[in-house]
Amino acid sequence: MGESKKRCFVVMGFGIKTDFVNGRKLDLNKSYRLLIKPVVEAKNLECVRADEILHSGNIDVQMYRELLEADLVIADLSTANPNALYELGVRHALRPYTTIVISEDKLVYPFDLNHILITSYQHLGDAIDYEEVERFREALGKIIDSVIDKVESDSPVYTYLNSLVPPSIQEKIKEAILDSPPPPVPAAEPSAAVGKAFSLIIQEAEDAIEVKDFSKARDLFKTAQVLSKDQKDTYLVHRLAFCTYKAAEPDLVTSLYQSLELLKSINLAHTNDPETVSSAGAVEKKLYECGEGNQHLEDSILYYQRSYYLLNNRYNGISLAMTLVYRATSSLAKSDQDRVADLIFARRTWERVLFLCDRDWPIILSKEKNDSQLMNDGTKDGQELGEYYNSQKYWILVNRAEAMYGLGRFEESQKAIEESKKVQHHPWQVESFQQQLGKLATEMKKVGHLLEPKWISPD
């Protein structure tokens, strides 16, 4: 009978997480799938993350068992994920060696970690470029080789408290874990999900979103939320809120209110999470467009302002400008002076969007050029990276077109639209842009004459 594989447990968040210090959103699933798992498996180690553990009992007990017994633990602290930091601390308390700590290179550590060796990698947010994948895989592979069989402390607990005797401590903890009975399965837990890896449910939900089956995706995310040990995980709530209003069941307005309640459950009123407030801005904007009242417009502006100032990005800038134009044409504007104030604010926001387009365009082209080898190798990773760059280029061009249109620079707007047609894109992207531009044109025709020089529709 062959010797069983050694096991690596990966400590990190899953899905898209926000770093609250710098506002960056990172797809941690790509960190795991591209940077960590392939390297671990290439070293003939079994690789598992918490969301891949089969759910047949208490996930916390299984997690502690992994932290105790895994031959190797890799902890990714990116986004200063509190669960990852806690689990790293547990590992350091249980095992004196074979723990590797990594993070993305823009992480601002929440406390002094200078005494811990942390290997960093570059993350683009939605993707990781090919050169960085190759570089980090090689670096991580060398670190694994150096620590997997090395009996030398990498835990600050055993380094500074060197009188501890880990074997006796481990035996007591192991006995406590083994004696802990699994809790009964909650009544609300769907029976079909018992024993199914959490990660598979999430992937199935994301696949459903790709084909616009939002009802299926919503139900899968509900299942994932039931199975999750963290009922208010921001990634799950964000995706559930998104799928809920996209499914528009039983009708759009009802689904929008349901989505808003989900976002309120993760401290919408006070959070600095830009994804939460940006999502709320989109929901409130749609409620206003559905005729649900001016308060939704006011709230939408408030949320978009918060997310725009936190992230300084094109999407929130474009959305903020649109809501300002809405307010200029609404009954909230009591005078022409009020209307002009909102229009000037919108114009300044569009000008900033143009600056951001000019900033982002050469960065995307440079990254795309560096990753051309991977994009053309016929793999799924290469295809996804190519789609990512095409999507980024398309949105930059239509963001430019919309900003130019709002500023009355119609020829330049049309030029950007023509350029966007040359970039591979999905039909829903065109539909989304055309709807937005149509709404902007309709509203600007009502108040554009108040500007100096006057905004005059090209139609």
Image (cartoon, rainbow, N blue to C red):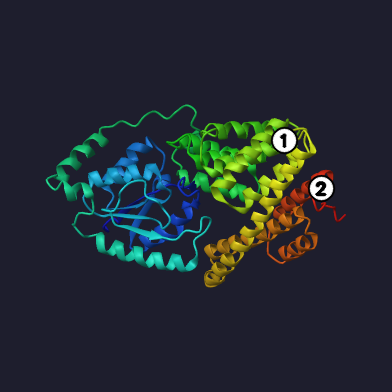
| Mark 1 / mark 2, whichever is N-terminal | 1
Residue 383: image quadrant is: bottom right
Labels 1, 2: front one: 2
Q: Nearer the viewer, residue 174 or 67?
A: 67
> Looking at numbered disc 2 in the image, what kind of residue is underneath it?
Gly
The answer to whether one can see residue 243 in this image is no
Residue 167: image quadrant is: top left
Q: Is residue 435 above or below residue 409?
A: above
Residue 154: image quadrant is: bottom left
Label drawn at residue 134:
none
Q: Which residue is mark 1?
A: 288
Left or right side of 429 for 224: left
Left or right side of 93 for 200: right
Q: Which residue is mark 2?
A: 448
Q: Quadrant of the C terminus?
A: bottom right
For label 1, the SS is helix
- Residue shown at 41%/58% (left/top)? 105
Residue 350: percent from left, percent from top: 69, 53
**How busy is the neighbourhood of tag 1: few (under 14 within 10 Å), some, or many (20 plus)?**
some
> Looking at numbered disc 1 in the image, what kind of residue is underneath it?
Tyr
Q: Is residue 239 above or below residue 120?
A: above
- Residue shown at 68%/51% (left/top)? 348
Left or right side of 454 for 94: left
